[in-house]
Amino acid sequence: ENPVVSSSSTPPPPTNGSSDTSSSSSSIPVGLYLNDVWQYELNCTRYGDGPCEDSTWTLLNAGAFRGGCRVVLGRQLCTHPSERWHHGAALFKDSTMLIYGGFSQRCEDYCDDLWSFDLRDNSFMELQAIGSSRIGPGKRWKFSLVADGSRFYIFGGFRLWHGFAADNSEQNRW
């Protein structure tokens, strides 16, 4: 269960780079890659170019370390998408956000999984597991993604070239 937690002025932490800052008494992670979901209300009271006066960032889902994955009967099941970066996300008319691709250590390189985040109950659901589909845009990151409310479209990006294979054609058909 992921309760909604309000924060008075703290935006999501930065996610560019990953390092540890150590001192003699503690180790503090800095710039971790995350899989949490935040919301910022744009319909609020503002003065000039200032931030919202009556609302700020709201944590919708705190995420789960390593995607909350566990092995059940020899199969890996995850409660969240793995921590990642350079992925695409789009919001749809049915109050869901789809998350595709990006780079994650769980994916071995670039990801090709598809996740849904339901804004009505702040929960994730895996729609397409890593490596489960031979049809589609394949493993990629740093691509452009746009949506029209009922479909999304992916253009370009980076993808590892593993030679000529049925699931990795030079024509990149899907």
Image (cartoon, rainbow, N blue to C red):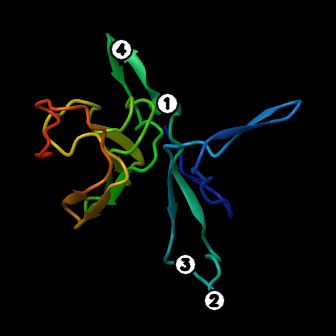
| Of callouts 3 and 1, the N-terminal one | 3
Q: Secondary structure at mark 2?
A: loop
**Along the viewing direction, whichever of 129 and 93 lies nearer the viewer:** 129
| Of callouts 4 and 2, the N-terminal one | 2
Circle 3 or circle 1, nearest the eye: 1
- What amino acid is labelled 3 in the image? Cys
Question: What residue sits right under mark 4 in the picture?
Answer: 72
Q: Residues within 10 Å of mark 3 (few under 14, many from 20)?
A: few
Image-based side of 90 in relation to 57, left or right: left
Circle 1 or circle 4, nearest the eye: 1
Q: Is residue 104 above or below residue 119?
A: above
Is there a contact, CB below 8 Å, between mark 3 and mark 1?
no
Is there a contact, CB below 8 Å, between mark 1 and mark 2?
no
- What amino acid is labelled 1 in the image? Arg
Q: Secondary structure at mark 3?
A: loop
- CA separation in Å, label 4 and label 3: 45 Å
- Residue under the image location 21 percent in, 30 percent down: 132
Mark number, residue 48: 2
| Of callouts 4 and 3, the N-terminal one | 3
Q: Farthest residue toward the right?
A: 24
Q: Secondary structure at mark 1?
A: helix
Q: Farthest residue toward the bottom?
A: 48
- CA separation in Å, label 1 and label 2: 41 Å
Q: Is residue 56 above or below residue 19?
A: below
Residue 91 horizontal/vertical position (percent): 32, 60
Query: In terms of image quadrants, where is residue 8?
Result: bottom right
- Residue under the image location 46 percent in, 47 percent down: 85
Mark number, residue 66: 1
